[in-house]
Amino acid sequence: MSSIEKNRLKTGFTTGAAAAAAAKGSLYLLLQGTAPKSVRIDFIGGGHREIDLHSCHRNGNKAICTVIKDAGDDPDVTHKAEIGACVEVSNASASEILITGGKGVGKVTKPGLEIPPGESAITSGPREMIKRAVNEVLSEIKPSAPCSEAGTGLSVYVEVFVPQGEHLAKRTLNSRLGIIGGISILGTTGIVRPMSHEAYIMTIRSALSVARACGLKRVFLTTGRRSERHAQQIWTDDQEEAYVQIGDFFKLSLELASEMEFETAVLTVFFGKAVKMAYGFPHTHAAKSDMCMKKLSHWAVQATGDPIIAQRILKANTARQAFFMLRNDHPEVIARVGMEMIRSAKKFIKGDIRIRSVILDFDGDIVFDSQYPNTFPRF
């Protein structure tokens, strides 16, 4: 066994995957009278995992199961936390799956997040996994009366809860973001991949090395699976090896790309990461949001001459909220961020590698491309 295999870090699963497993177990218990010891959850990005159920019981016409979240070798504040789902069903004119948060799941109170104010802090990835899990059970089990009757649909109500969620939230930045009363139920794919610096750096280095070995001269540096997927949908002629997820390693990935003598590195990121890169943080996870927002406000007044938009940016809860202020009325500020990304990147490289910056909106469309700086958008 190689040293890499010996030191391979264990992946875990997200709070969203845990909630989906709890919901699936609860629905089994409700519809067939027993719950399995574990359930299979299919991850959004591919693959699956068998997740153990920690506890299951019925309470009248409701079923409740919980899961112990496993973050693998990347433990965070929710590692070993109990995540549960309370499920009930009823006849309805049309089938539907309703998802909400209960005890220990935060409520969104400020704008600027993926979830609008007033709703439970359960993001789109977990909602999709929960719906998939519920539909898998429904397709497997045909509930008998009174749960379902001929000509009617079945409404499934899922309430996600985290018994210690309010306590755990105190160890997060949720309150600063306006998420009150508990944690967020998160997860883009369902998998928690270990974020060991050593392991991640090795992954970046290996990915760039493979791209170079394939004879590629241009690489697309994205910060995660979502931005990578959008980039692949835009530049469909480039080989799969041209796309490298760099996580938060802004400086290191550019250093490696220049050392390997690529001709072009295309930074393809969402606006929040773009602002951190533009500021010049070598490792964007460590970036301080208040510093970034002050700098963004400064760039805004320089680009527009409008102190009012600058003040609005300073009051924004997140870079996401600031993005929506700027996209339609002040694209020149987004352009400034894009050009500052290049200026920052050039501090980290050696040689003649060309840096191109591309900023995506949250649907994956280009809102700035330094190759076409005066056109919005341009693909």
Image (tube, helix red, strand yellow):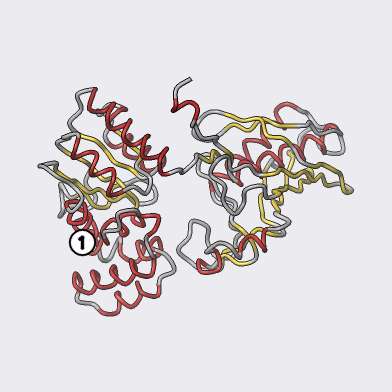
Quarter of the image containing the C terminus? top left
* Residue drawn where x is 19% and y is 24% of the image: 215
163 vs 236: above or below: below
Residue 3 location, quadrant: top left
**Residue 298 located left or right of residue 97:** left
Q: Count the numbered circles shown.
A: 1
Tell me where residue 169 appears, x and y as whole percent: 61, 62
Q: Horizontal placement of 192 versus 39: left or right?
A: left
Instruction: Identify which residue, 363 or 193, lies in the foreground.
Output: 193
Q: Can you name the residue that lies furthest to the top here?
A: 1
Image-based side of 204 in relation to 77, left or right: left
Q: Position of residue 149 (x, y in %)?
A: 82, 35
Residue at x-position 87% and y-position 48%: 59
Residue 117 falls in image quadrant: bottom right
* Residue sitting at x 30%, y 79%: 308
Tell me if residue 359 comes above or below residue 210 in the rendering. Answer: below
Q: Position of residue 333 (x, y in %)?
A: 24, 64
Few, some or many residues within 10 Å of mark 1 (<14, 14–19, 20+)? many
Q: Secondary structure at mark 1?
A: helix
Query: What amino acid is found at the position of numbered circle 1 in the picture?
Result: Arg
Residue under label 1, please give it: 336
Q: Position of residue 83 (x, y in %)?
A: 69, 48
* Residue that lies at the very extreme toward the right in this rendered image: 60
Which residue occupies the foreground of this view, 305 or 16?
A: 16
Picture residue at 55% right of the left edge, 64% below the top: 174
